[in-house]
Amino acid sequence: MLRKIWRAFLSSALLATALCAQAAAQPGTHAPARREVAVTFDDLPAPYGELEDLRRITTRLLESVKRNRVPAVGFVNEGKLYRRGEMDARTELLRAWLDAGLELGNHTFSHLNLHRAPLEEYKDDVLRGETVTRMLLNERGLRLRYFRHPFLFTGTTPEYKRGLSEFLAGRGYTVAPVTVDNGDYIFADAYFKAKKRGDAATAKRVADAYVPYLEGVFEHFERLSVETFGREVRQVLLLHANEINADRFDELAAMLLRRGYRFVALEEALKDPAYAEPDALYKNGISWLHRWRMAKGLPTKWEPEVPKFVDELYKAGRQGG
């Protein structure tokens, strides 16, 4: 009798082991024991819209970020604060990020394109972009420590890149790189404009496609990370403080949790040794995983594109103003 019980136990254990091994061998069915991601938002207080739009987006986005316990960093374009009669109200939106226990970083004053600006002009825009943000952080005994390049452009030449890097380091900044780059701004533009014109069906179609698209992007960069480093790095996700993220961040967070991710602070993510690797100069904004691969002489493998219907809505909206 005991032998039968023991044989049954061994059979069950072997079956369970085989099933686990089979699941692990199938891509996308079994996450690594530990995946980590830092979430960052650009273009605070919001990329576009009137004051009431900004208030609505900020309120809903922060509620969702707090609900999902995400230690996010928001990168500020202080030029968006300067609207006649609205500067105090817009500044309060930045305070709301700090009230939520989150952190603020510098994204330059005007979201300057360094391809159109000499280095000295770019430096001035960085300095202008830290005035209010530094004051708000100082009020709470915090310091301004992160910088995010607009468009993820880090330099037009090796000399420009090196000069900017030295300037930022001299100001006490840590550059916030991005590994999971994506087209959330394309979805956001199409979504925001559909809602503004009362086209609920199109807005829903765009929003319903958003998180599945981002899941495909994560799958791509997870694979690329393993191909590049033999493991998955701690990812840094770039999003924008826009309406589609305000409305769908709960769904996005649930997708990441299902994929085995733990939300970590940017400071923790950057402790991954990958971020000390040299990143190749590239004149357009791309993921650091692409830059590391270029530095290693590895082939470029681009992430999935935005669905065609979303891209067409985005282009039509840009042409229409």
Image (cartoon, helix red, strand yellow):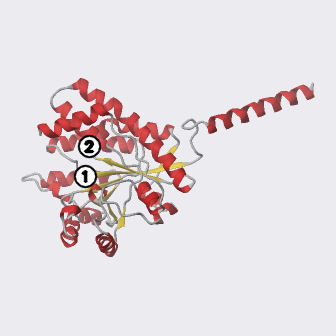
Residue 303 at what x, y percent from top left? 40, 44
SS assignment at label 1: strand
SS assignment at label 2: loop
**As displayed, is residue 155 above or below residue 234?**
below
Q: Residue at x 49, y 40 (%)?
A: 257
Q: Are marks 2 and 1 in contact (CB under 8 Å)?
A: yes
Q: Tell me which corner region of the image, top left, top right, bottom left or bottom right, holds residue 9.
A: top right
Q: Residue 43's mark?
A: 1
Image quarter where the N terminus lies is: top right
Amino acid under disc 1 = Asp
Q: Residue 161's mark?
A: none
Q: Residue at x 22, y 48 (%)?
A: 46
Relative placement, left or right, of 153 versus 261 is left
Q: Callout 2 environment at 10 Å: few (<14), some (14 to 19), or many (20+)? A: many
**As displayed, is residue 184 above or below residue 75?**
above
Relative placement, left or right, of 194 versus 305 is left
- Say which residue label 2 marks: 242
Estimate the spatial distance between the alpha carbons at disc 2 and disc 1, rounded to whole Å: 9 Å
Amino acid under disc 2 = Asn
Residue 137 at what x, y percent from top left? 29, 63
Residue 313 at what x, y percent from top left? 22, 33
